[in-house]
Image (cartoon, rainbow, N blue to C red):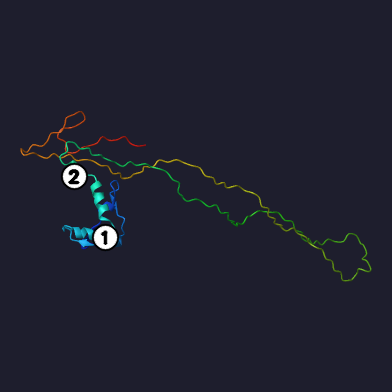
């Protein structure tokens, strides 16, 4: 394992039988910390480890050589050994499918707030008021004046009345504002990228320069350079 930046680090050896390999996710997990691997014994990339070097690596990681040897003996043959000289091959092709779910999220809302506005109302009203009418008319007949009222000062007060507007206000319900919710359904197109595995078929020419012939069984094509899988039905 190489550590460092921009290819300037060192090469460290890690016991391979302690690794956990996830072929599906293409992940390799080791039961060691990053600092422990960085401080491990370092060797050249093309160096061949001696028995003493292997013992040094086992002692550093705390692994017994017997455990490593038994793990290597019980390990199945490599894929390269299996594919060498085989007469047939079976490659599984995988593809991703999109499954669309639904969840509720907040889409905003409204707030109803009652406010008070003031406006001036003009309304006509009829009001009554009294006025003084002064008239001078000649006396009727030759009536003698009263002895006590003659040549005496006299003060007479006549009150006047009028009507004035009296304003009263009364509150009443003019209208109601009702707010409610309703559910509507809309169609949306969801786009997502999916991965699909494929296989390329390439024939290797023999000494005479002839490429191998492909089968002409029903559903196959002669001298094809790329396998094209049938389009699957759309998922609802």
Asked whether disc 1 touches disc 2, contact meaning CB atoms under 8 Å apart, the reply is no
Q: Secondary structure at mark 2?
A: helix
- Residue identified by numbered label 2: 80
Q: Position of residue 148 (x, y in %)?
A: 93, 69
Residue 163 image point, x, y percent: 74, 58
Viewer-side residue, 18 vs 29 = 18
Q: Determine whether the residue tagged by mark 1 lies in a helix, strand or loop.
A: helix
| Residue appearing at x 25%, y 55% in the figure | 65
Q: Give the image quarter of residue 89.
A: top left
Q: Decide which of tag 1 and tag 2 comes sooner along the chain.
A: 1
- Specify the farthest residue to the front: 66
Viewer-nearest of discs 1 and 2: 1
Residue 157 lies, in percent from the top left, at 83, 66
Residue in front for this viewpoint, 218 or 73: 73
Identify the residue at image location x=21%, y=44%. 79
Q: Which residue is mark 1?
A: 59
Q: Residue 177: percent from the left, percent from the top?
A: 57, 47
Q: Is residue 97 left or right of residue 105?
A: left
Query: For residue 158, what is the image quadrant?
Result: bottom right
Is 205 on the left or on the right of 99, as rendered? left
Name the foreground residue: 228 vs 129.
228
On screen, residue 136 versus residue 227, left or right, reads right
- In the rendered image, the quadrant that contains the C terminus is top left
Q: Residue at x 24, y 59 (%)?
A: 57
Residue at mark 1 to residue at mark 2: CA–CA distance: 31 Å
Q: Nearer the viewer, residue 213 or 192?
A: 213
């Amino acid at each position: 394992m190489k550590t460092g930046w921009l290819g300037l680090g060192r090469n460290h050896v890690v016991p391979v039988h302690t690794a956990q390999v996830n072929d599906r996710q293409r992940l390799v997990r080791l039961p060691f910390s990053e600092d422990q691997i960085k401080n491990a014994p370092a060797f050249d990339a093309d160096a061949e480890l001696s028995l003493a070097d292997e013992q040094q690596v086992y002692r550093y990681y705390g692994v017994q050589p017997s455990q490593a040897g038994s793990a290597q003996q019980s390990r199945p043959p490599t894929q390269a050994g299996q594919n060498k000289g085989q007469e047939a091959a079976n490659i599984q092709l995988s593809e991703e499918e999109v499954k669309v779910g639904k969840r509720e999220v907040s889409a905003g809302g409204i707030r109803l707030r009652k406010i008070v506005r003031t406006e001036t109302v003009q309304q006509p009203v009829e009001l009554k008021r009294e006025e003084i009418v002064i008239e001078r008319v000649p006396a009727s007949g030759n009536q003698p004046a009263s002895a006590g009222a003659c040549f005496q000062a006299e003060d007479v007060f006549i009150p006047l009345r009028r009507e004035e507007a009296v304003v009263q206000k009364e509150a009443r319900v003019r209208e109601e504002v009702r707010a409610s919710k309703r559910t509507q359904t809309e169609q949306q197109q969801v786009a997502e990228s999916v991965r699909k595995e494929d296989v390329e078929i390439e024939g290797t020419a023999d000494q005479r320069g002839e490429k191998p012939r492909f089968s002409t069984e029903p559903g196959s094509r002669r001298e094809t350079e790329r396998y094209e899988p049938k389009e699957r039905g759309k998922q609802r």
